[in-house]
Image (cartoon, grey):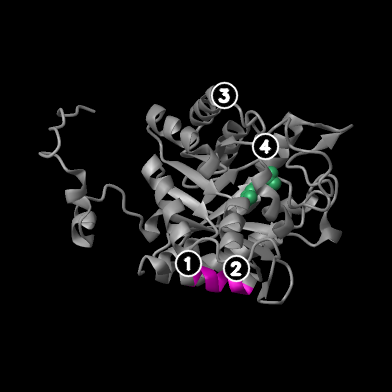
Amino acid sequence: MSRAPLAAFPAIRPRRLRQSDWMRRLVRETVLTPADLIWSIVVHEGEADTIEVASMPGAPRLSVAECGRAAARAKALGIPAIAVFPHVDPRKKDERGTAALDPDNVVCRAVKAMKDAAPEVGVMCDVALDPFTSHGHDGLVEGGRILNDATVAVLVEQALVQARAGCDILAPSDMMDGRVAALRAALESDGHSDAAIMAYAAKYASAFYGPYRDAIGSASVLTGDKKTYQMDPGNSEEALREVALDISEGADMVMVKPGMPYLDIVRRVVEAFSLPTFAFQVSGEYAMIQAAAERGWIDGDRAMLESLTGFKRAGCAGIITYFAPRAAQALGA
Ligand code: PBG
C-alpha cells in the first residue's frame, strides 16, 4: 500500500476525523454486519427446549425443534448460516463413535429441522467424532494413539451422512492429515458437488475449548489431550502449511481457531491465500466476555461487538460465534 507523506502538526490533526459520530461513521474502515456471522449452536436429544450450560451463560443446548426455530430467527436477523454441534446421549457413545454414522442421529435431525424451517439459511456441520466417542477424541484411538487413516475413512462416512441430511457446509475439525481430499472426492462421487468444505485448517490445541466440551458433554470423558493432532500454539509457519494443504486438497473456505489469541494467524492467512478465511470465536472466548460482563467488570455488548469487529478488521470473511443473534440484534437487524 502506498502512503502519501503526512503533513506535520498542526496541518494534520488526526482528531478532526474523530470529532463527532457522523464523522467517525463517515471514515470507518470496517463495518460489522449480521452477514458476517455464523451462529454456533449445540443441539441435545431431549425434549426440553433449552438446557442451560453453566460455563456458557446465554448459550444453552437446544432441542431439535428449537433448532428449527433458531433457523427461522437467523433468517429474520440476516444471519446467513448456523453451525450445529451435538450433545449426544452418553449411552449412545462408543469407542468408534458409531452414532456419527446413524442417518437419524441428533445432528441429522437438527439439520433437517433447520432446513425445513428456513431453507434460505445455510447449515454447517462439524466433521469429527468427539461428540460421539466414549473417550472424547476426534478420531479412532488404539493403544492410546490416534489412527489417522482409519479415522479419515470414518469421517468420510460421517460427512456423507450429514450431506444427505441436507448439510450445506462440511467443516472437518478433526485435524487428521489428508481428510479434506478424501471428503471432497466422496462428496463428488455421492452427488454432493454443491456441498462446500470449510476446513478447520489451523486449529490449535487450546484451553479455550473448555466450555464447548461441557456443552457437548465430552469434558467428563476426554482422556488425555489432543496435542498429537491439534496444533502447537507457538507455531505460525505451520499454520500456513496446514492452510496450503487444505486448499490444495479442495477446501472452499478455511478457518483459524480459536479466534482472538490467533488474529496474527488470521492476518497471515488472509494475506497469503485468496480464499474466504473465517475465525471461530470459541466457547472460552465467549465465556470470558460473559463472565466479566456478569460481574460488571466490562460492558458485555460493547466487548462483544468490539471483539467481532476485530476479526473482520483482521481480514475475516466471517466469524463463527455463539454471540451471533445477540450481535445481529445489537447491530439493529
Ligand atoms: C472438536 C471441536 C472443538 C470445537 C468444535 N469442534 C474443540 C475440541 O474439543 O477440541 C470447539 C468449539 C468451541 O470451543 O467453541 N471437533
Residue matched to label 4: 205
Report the amino acid beneath label 4: Ala
Q: Are marks 2 and 1 in contact (CB under 8 Å)?
A: yes
Badge 3: residue crowd in 10 Å (few <14, some 14–19, many ≥20): few
Q: Are marks 2 and 4 in contact (CB under 8 Å)?
A: no
Q: Amino acid at mark 2?
A: Gly
Q: Are marks 1 and 3 in contact (CB under 8 Å)?
A: no
| N-terminal label among 3 and 2 | 2
Label 2: few (<14), some (14–19) or many (≥20) C-alpha neighbours in 10 Å = some
Q: Position of residue 76 (x, y in %)?
A: 41, 71
Q: Give the residue number, with chain letter if any, for mark 2.
A: 58
Residue found 46% across the figure and 64% down from its top: 301
User: Is residue 66 part of the magenta span, yes or no?
Assistant: yes
The quarter in which the N terminus is drawn is top left
Q: Which residue is nearer to you in this view: 208 or 169?
A: 208
Question: In the rendered structure, which disc, 4 or 1, sits on the residue that comes first in sequence?
Answer: 4
Circle 1: element type: helix
Where is residue 162 shown, x and y percent of the image? Answer: 62, 53
Mark 1 burial class by Cα count in 10 Å: few <14, some 14-19, many 20+:
some
The residue singled out by tag 1 in the image is 326
Q: Is residue 296 visible?
A: yes
Q: Quadrant of the C terminus?
A: bottom left
Q: Nearer the viewer, residue 246 or 298?
A: 298
Q: Evaluate whether residue 118 shows in this view.
A: no
The answer to whether 313 appears left or right of 45 in the picture is left
Q: Which mark is residue 32?
A: none
